[in-house]
Image: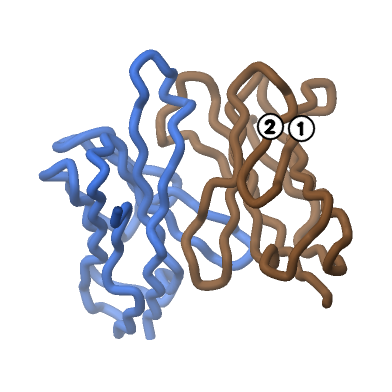
Amino acid sequence: AQSVTQPDIHITVSEGASLELRCNYSYGATPYLFWYVQSPGQGLQLLLKYFSGDTLVQGIKGFEAEFKRSQSSFNLRKPSVHWSDAAEYFCLMRNYGGSQGNLIFGKGTKLSVKP
Amino acid sequence: NAGVTQTPKFQVLKTGQSMTLQCAQDMNHEYMSWYRQDPGMGLRLIHYSVGAGITDQGEVPNGYNVSRSTTEDFPLRLLSAAPSQTSVYFCASSYSMLGTPSGANVLTFGAGSRLTVL
């Protein structure tokens, strides 16, 4: 069955520290992968996406993610976290040619940032 | 550049009442969808539409109705609200780029509607 797993429900990092949020997927081929961020009380905003090609993708707000086929992972990274990065982060997957009906969400990772 | 607009932002209902959550987009997107977000559950798809006049059920459609009479609007109706429908609801839209598989569509989300059913 297709699935997206975000193993960490809640992560706390210090401002200025590096960040890595984990995302693992289960799918028989290469899926389309997305990371979205949800700030408190807001809708979801696209950070970055992976469709094909270079496995290291750059996104907005200084985020990047690396697609690793061998590990079925698409982890999100940022070298230096800012207090404004405190939010909830969602990893999403959709298979090739998939309609909106099969967009699969991870359950999210909440990021807290210590001053 | 309004994007996806949801109204109301907050609503309190009594059990058994009906209401409609409105969603409008001004980007001429073909696809529109409704999700509910509950703590620890992520976002779950309620209904979606691939174009005017076409709708389909998602993962959790029971208790909700939708219609798509225009490209711009995709209202979500609760016919008889229940406490289990207390949630935050998100509308999203996307377009299909010519020559790009539909799986590559990027969703644009509204700001959400928080519904409480007493």
- Residue B108 against residue A24 in the figure, above or below: below
Q: Which residue is mark 1?
A: A66
Q: Residue B54's spot in the image, x, y percent?
A: 20, 35
- Residue B62 is left or right of residue A84, and the answer is left
Extreme residue toward the left, this view: B69
> Is disc 1 surrounded by few (<14), some (14 to 19) or many (20+) residues within 10 Å?
some
Q: In front here: B75 or A35? A: A35
Please tell me the numbered disc located at residue B5: none
Q: Residue at x 83, y 68 (%)?
A: A15
User: Which quarter of the picture shows residue B57?
Assistant: top left
Q: Is residue A102 above or below residue A85?
A: above
Q: Secondary structure at mark 1?
A: strand
Q: In the figure, residue B49 lies in which quadrant?
A: top left
Q: Is residue A29 visible?
A: no
Q: Residues within 10 Å of mark 2 (few under 14, many from 20)?
A: some
Chain ID for blue: B
Chain ID, mark 2: A
Please provide percent x and percent y for residue A87.
65, 65
**Given the image, on which type of amino acid does mark 1 rest?**
Glu
Q: Closest to the observer: B37 or B106?
A: B106
Residue bearing mark 2? A57
Residue type at tag 2? Val
Drawing shade for chain A:
brown
Secondary structure of the residue carrying numbered label 2: strand
Query: Which of the two labelled residues, at mark 1 and mark 2, occupies the earlier sequence position?
Result: 2
Front residue of A9 and A88: A88
Q: Chain of mark 1?
A: A
Quarter holding the C terminus of chain A?
bottom right
State the residue at coordinates (41%, 29%).
Answer: A99
- A63 versus B7 height, above or below: above
> Which residue: 50% across, 37% down?
A103
